[in-house]
Amino acid sequence: MHFRRMKKNQFPPTQGFSLLEVLIAAVIVTLAASWAIPQYRRQLALNQLDQYTQKIESGLFSLRARQSTEGTSCEIKFAANYVGTDNINGDFGSVENIVELGHLSKEDRAQRLQCCDTKQCEWNPPYRLIDLEQTAISKNVEIKVSQSTYSLSPPGTSTDGNALVMLVRSTSWDQDPQRPLPIRCIKFSTSGHLHSGTWEDTRCRRR
C-alpha cells in the first residue's frame, strides 16, 4: 500500500473570519462596554460614598470617646449655607468646608470645632471630626447638616434639643437621572448614640 507524503511545510487550508463576522463582534463588544462602564462607575461612586460615611461615623465615635476621657465640652459649628435637610437638591458643600479641619489655621479651626475643659481650649494633637483627611475620596463626596451648631458635654451627650444629622452624597449622584445614587446619613442623637443609614422620607433609616 502506498501513502502519499505531504510536501514539507504543507498544511491544510484554514478559514478566517469574514468581514461581517468581525463587524458583528465589534458591535457586541461596544454594546457590552456601553453597559459595563457606567455600571462600574456607579459602583465605584457608591463604594466611595459608603467609605466616607463610615469615616465620619468613626471620627465622631473617636471625638466622643476622647471628649469623655479628657472631660471636655465641645462646640461644633457649621456654615449656615450648608444647613438644612429639608431640601436635598442643593446646598451641599465640600468636605473641606464642613468636616475636614487639618488644612485650617488654629484660629479657623476653633471657629469650626472647639473643645475645652476648665483650664484650656488648646490641645495637642488637636480635636478633629474625622481621623483621616484629604484622601482621594474627599473630592468625590459632599455634605450638608441639620443645624449650624451642636454642643457635646463630657459624657458625649448633648443639651441641644435635636439630634445632629449629616447628609453625605456623591458628587456624581445624579449622573444617571433615572437611577440617582442614594444619600447616606449619620445621626448623632442627644443621648450620644450614633448610627448611619440611608436618607429616605426625611429620616435616617438604618441599612
Image (cartoon, rainbow, N blue to C red):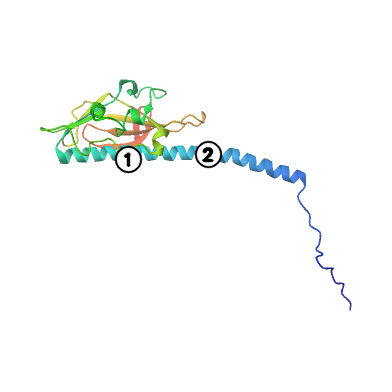
> How far apart are the two marked residues, 2 and 1, measured between alpha carbons?
28 Å
| In front: label 2 or label 1 | 1
User: What residue is pinned by disc 1?
Assistant: 132
Disc 2 marks a residue whose amino acid type is: Gln
Q: Is residue 207 visible?
A: no
Extreme-top residue of the structure: 81
Disc 1 marks a residue whose amino acid type is: Leu
Side of 125 relative to 52 (left or right): left
**Whole-percent x and y of residue 94?**
37, 29
Residue 33 against residue 108 in the figure, above or below: below
Query: Residue visible at 81% across and 62% down?
Result: 12
User: What residue is pinned by disc 2?
Assistant: 39
Side of 140 relative to 68 (left or right): right
Side of 53 relative to 28 (left or right): left
Query: Residue visible at 27% across and 23% down?
Result: 148
**Whole-percent x and y of residue 44?**
47, 40
Extreme-front residue of the structure: 105
**Quadrant location of the C terminus?**
top left
**Whole-percent x and y of residue 112?**
26, 28
Residue 12 against residue 155 in the figure, above or below: below
Residue 193 against residue 107 in the figure, above or below: below
